Image: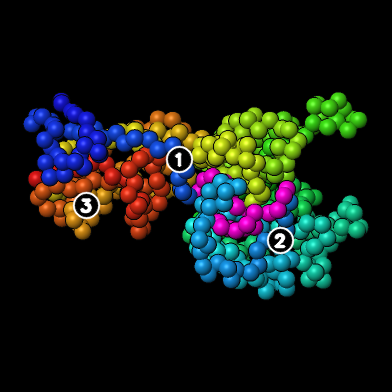
Amino acid sequence: MSTAEITREKAAAHTENWRAQFHKDEYLQRVRPKEFHGYLPNPHRGTTTFQRFNGDALYPGLMWDDSKGPLEFLPFRGVPQSLHNPQYPDTTLSYCRWLWSVIEPEKGKIRWDVIDGALEAARVRGQTLQLRIQPYIGDDMPAWYWNLGGKADPKSDPKRREPDHNHAAYLKHWGEFLRAFGQRYDGHAVLESFDIAYGGPCGECGGNTTRGTAKKLVDVYLKSFKKTQLVSMLGTFGCAYASKNTEIGWRADCYGDLRSEGKGHVPDQLCWNHMLDAYPKEVHENGVADTWKTAPVTMETCWTVGYWESKGWDVDWILEQGLKYHTSVFMPKSSFIPDRWREKLDAWDRRLGYRFVLRQMILPLEAKPGTKANFTFFVDNVGVAPLYRGYPLALRFRQGKQSEIVKLKAAPRSWLPGVNYASGSFAFPKKLQRGTVDVSVALVDEKTLAPRVLFANQGYTGDGWLPLTFMDVV
């Protein structure tokens, strides 16, 4: 069997007589697009904004606000002149969280307008939205909750009336809220993920829940969200319980913490911190070491990246650990990235989640409409995780204004980091006319067949399809 190489550049120069560079006995062509090393605006991976959207100003200095998600969205009727922020990575993700008392200020009267507004704001700014509803922070449970029988944790500080999560009132009212939320938003196209934040301040640590209560609360999330990606909180019993479902991701909320001050209790440099003590232990105990193969991992900074710099922490080591945990999403609180670390963070961001380089595709030089045509490809995932969504691999055949799209039998969701190879056949479109056809490739939306994921290759022309080569229709 004889084959030959062809590049897109050479083919473009010989559109009408592109076969001239092949020997008459050749019938296969190898296509090898050049790799692109810059930023790609791909979905479901990378850095997120926090309580903000693309184009918004960053928090000043080293500050941020965990509790105050956006409530007004008039500015989002228009798109800013630039969605790029010179002190922050480009992003296709936003992360917002609100207090329960804000979203349900009266029993049963849920502020759907806030969530609807945030989802629309993210869409307009080219983002999807990660979301968390927090039961409380401090003493700010919904006032109506106490009036309807809610009880405080007897062990909590009287000045901070924290709820008893094991009480029937909490299971009832928090559960009803989650069910209503899931009924309205489960599967929403812009809702990237929803945090399993079932108890404790910020919904992060599980609070005073017993194991039995944690199971019941996690089950409410699992039953209420069948389509939207759920993300559990590392270090909680709920995370260990949820990990039995391999489609549930996890997040860690103090990434980068390398605190070193012993404060007179232990020698400096030998005190407890998240990076050396919490994460290795909790990943092991929660049983999530291999979760990344089927569900995403999110890392939220401890303090901010600027704070890391002020403390002199080893950013190279921190970032390296993030890759070892196969992180897909990074949330640095919409706080500035120090100038001297920006290049490092941008390079690291490009490795988060998936990044597909099409190294080679083999196609026939010609085919007859309605017949089977063979293909072979080699995709190199140079990221650290797979793509957790089912976007089919497709070829587009275009003649003038006519386009025919064919989905290939491939499984991009299974493309783990490293070499991914597949071969098969497809039906060459019946509507193509005798002559030359332009061939492009993309990962597309299952329903609309519009391109959704860009390959890390050069040659894009703006429509999301990566030009490959030509074929003759015979």
For the residue pair 288 and 244, the one nearer the viewer reads as: 288
Image location (x, y in percent) of residue 281: 70, 32
Location of residue 322 with respect to 304 vertically, above or below: above
Tag 2 residue: 68
- Between disc 2 and disc 1, the foreground one is 1
Residue 38, disc: 1
Cα distance in 3D space between marks 3 and 2:
49 Å
Principal secondary structure, stretch drawn in magenta: loop
Location of residue 190 with respect to 23 vertically, above or below: below
Q: In this view, does 414 lie to the left or right of 92?
A: left
Q: Is residue 367 left or right of residue 273?
A: left
Q: Is residue 53 magenta?
A: yes
Q: Can residue 302 be seen in this view?
A: no
Residue type for callout 3: Arg
Location of residue 154 with respect to 427 vertically, above or below: below
Q: Can residue 41 be seen in this view?
A: yes
Residue type for callout 1: Gly
* Residue at point 80%, 69% (across, down): 143
Cα distance in 3D space between marks 1 and 3:
28 Å
Tag 3 residue: 398
- Magenta residues? 44-62
Q: Alpha-carbon neighbours of circle 1 within 10 Å: few (<14), some, or many (≥20)? A: few
Q: Is mark 2 on a helix, strand or loop?
A: loop
Pointer 3 or 2: first along the chain: 2
Residue type for callout 2: Lys
* Residue at point 72%, 32% (across, down): 313
* Residue at point 16%, 44% (across, down): 15
Image location (x, y in percent) of residue 151: 84, 62
